[in-house]
Image (cartoon, rainbow, N blue to C red):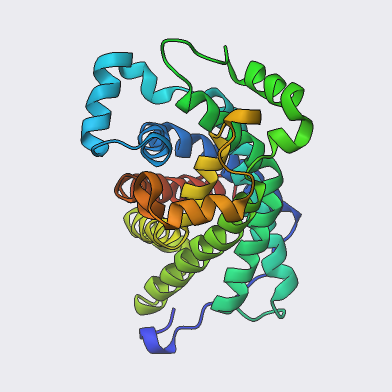
Amino acid sequence: MASSAESFTPVYTPPGWRDNVKDLAAGATGGVAQVVIGQPFDLVKVRLQTQGGSGALSLTQQIWQREGPLAFYKGSLVPLLGVGACVSIQFSAFHYFQHQLTSHNRPPTLPQTYLSGALAGLTNSILSGPIEHIRIRLQTQPQAHPLYTGPWHCALTLLRTGGLPALYRGQTATLIREGHGIGIWFATYEGLLSLAAKRQSLTRESLPNWQIALCGALAGEMLWLLSHPIDVVKSRMQSDGFGKDQKYRSFREAWGVAVRGGGGGVWKGLGTALLRAGPVSGGTFVVVEMVRKVLG
């Protein structure tokens, strides 16, 4: 071990197939943790973005009183089944692209890390797009007269309504948010983790869990600060009606309405998103790192 932080240089080791298996397993576990921790926050965020309201606390109280505590996990079956797969794809694709973009035996630069994360986010969006669309439909449907009996009914209804384009509504916004957002997420996390390890002359594997959680939490805050406006547009498009009830014909139109301030503007629900981001992101990275250590 080096005697000072200034003389410590982390060694980059290219990933092998065992690392890919660990990424998949750790990502799946981290995805489940992400849903369990973040679903109540996400429900409030989506409703604020799509239906407005006086504030997150007031809306939370209304949901509790009118729909009961289980309402905060409305639409969670699809995320539980799908987010684990999505996070698995994110981590395995991230390390794959990072390996492709990085010179052998040299640690990746911050731009390389961002690009690797962005490519992982774009790859993941193929699966995350329809999963989030279904979740948002279930979270925003009327309580008194629900339109869908569950996630599978929702998916089939969308397919019958307009085929794959209906299922993938808002995909342009999803691609932008996932690409830029996941790029920021991994770049911030890896940058902070490397800085913490270097300052303490430690390897990243030996950092305590609280530091991993802190780096992950800050990465989550940065993700949502820099991608929230796109997420607002995505939520509006994916909760929009069909046919004569459709308000937004394109991403550009939805963006224009949001920017002009209709229904709260592009920053509606940001407070709830940031409140959710810290524990969800920190918990995800801690679980992922713990599972990777257990798997050796």
* 18 to the left or right of 280: right
Q: Position of residue 166 (x, y in %)?
A: 70, 34
Residue 157 image position (x, y, % from top left): 69, 20
Q: Position of residue 85 (x, y in %)?
A: 64, 38
User: Which residue is painted at 66% across and 36% down in the image?
Assistant: 130
The residue nearer to you, when weighing 188 against 192, is 188
Q: Residue furthest right?
A: 163
Residue 242 visible in the current orientation: no
Percent of width and height locating residue 90: 62, 51
160 vs 43: above or below: above
In the image, residue 280 sits, relative to residue 166, either above or below, namely below
108 to the left or right of 52:
right
Q: Residue at x 57, y 70 (%)?
A: 114
Q: Residue furthest front?
A: 244
Query: Residue 188: which quarter of the image?
Result: bottom left
Q: Residue at x 51, y 68 (%)?
A: 187
- Residue at 58%, 27% (x, y): give it: 78
Q: Which quarter of the picture shows residue 113? A: bottom right
User: Which quadrant would the N terminus be assigned to in this image?
Assistant: bottom left
Q: Nearer the viewer, residue 64 or 247?
A: 247
Res. 85 visible in picture: yes
Residue 1 vs residue 128, the one in the foreground: 128
Q: Nearer the viewer, residue 75 or 117?
A: 75
How many marks can you see?
0
Quadrant housing residue 5: bottom left
